[in-house]
Image: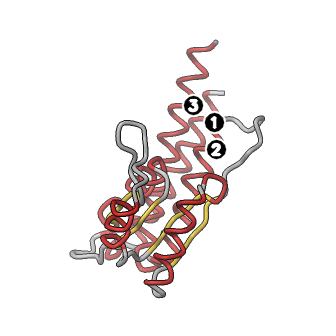
Amino acid sequence: MLNLSFRVSSCCGLVLAFTCLAFPKDLMAQSPTVTFVVVTDVSDGEWVKRIGRHVVRVEVLFPPKHGEIDGNYQTCNARVRNLLNFDVLLVREAMSSPRQLIWRERMTGANPRGKVHSITQSRDSLTAAHDREMQLAIDVHGALVSVLPKQQAVLNANLILELQRLRALHLTELATHD
């Protein structure tokens, strides 16, 4: 098992090194355009930050306060107005509430240049949490690359680092269970 992990880590390291050597000016861009991403789920926001790093600004559509979402119309309307200049709206279809759907429709109607990307979430209880996390990272990466093609080298490198981190966490969990 550890031999396989070493091979995977080595391959990821080689891909990362190749990306850095093949696209050095992409990775060293002095002032990349920052893309404004609005997410509907807090954990998706964390993944966008990890993979997008310095090329994204992330906001949660309705961030929970003390574990509860404030549902008052004035608060929601003010929040949506502050987010109308989004470049990307990243949503999880399986987790959308009717209230979120209404506000999403208003946002996309008011900002036709903004792109909406849906992330699917596995409902298969047999799929390991580790595999779901890896798939989520890959899905977020795909959404970001589709709107930031000039930053693909940076996004690829960040994805590789995150997949390596997830694999290391998974191997640590496996080692502690044995």
Tell me which numbered mark, 2 or 3, is placed earlier along the sequence.
Answer: 2
- Residue under the image location 45 percent in, 65 percent down: 19
Query: What amino acid type should be assigned to the residue bearing mark 3?
Result: His
Q: Looking at the image, which is closer to me, 135 or 28?
A: 135
Question: Is label 2 in a helix, a strand or a loop?
Answer: helix
Query: What amino acid type should be assigned to the residue bearing mark 2?
Result: Arg
Q: Is residue 178 left or right of residue 10?
A: right
Mark 2 and mark 1 residues within 8 Å of each other at the beta carbon? yes
Q: Is residue 72 above or below residue 129?
A: below
Q: Position of residue 142 (x, y in %)?
A: 56, 67
Alpha carbon separation for disc pair 2 and 3: 12 Å
Classify 10 Å Cα crowding around label 2: few (below 14), some (14-19), many (20 and above): some
Q: Which residue is mark 3?
A: 170
Q: Is residue 161 left or right of residue 97?
A: left
Q: Which residue is mark 1?
A: 129
Quarter residue 30 falls in = bottom left
Q: Which residue is mark 2?
A: 132
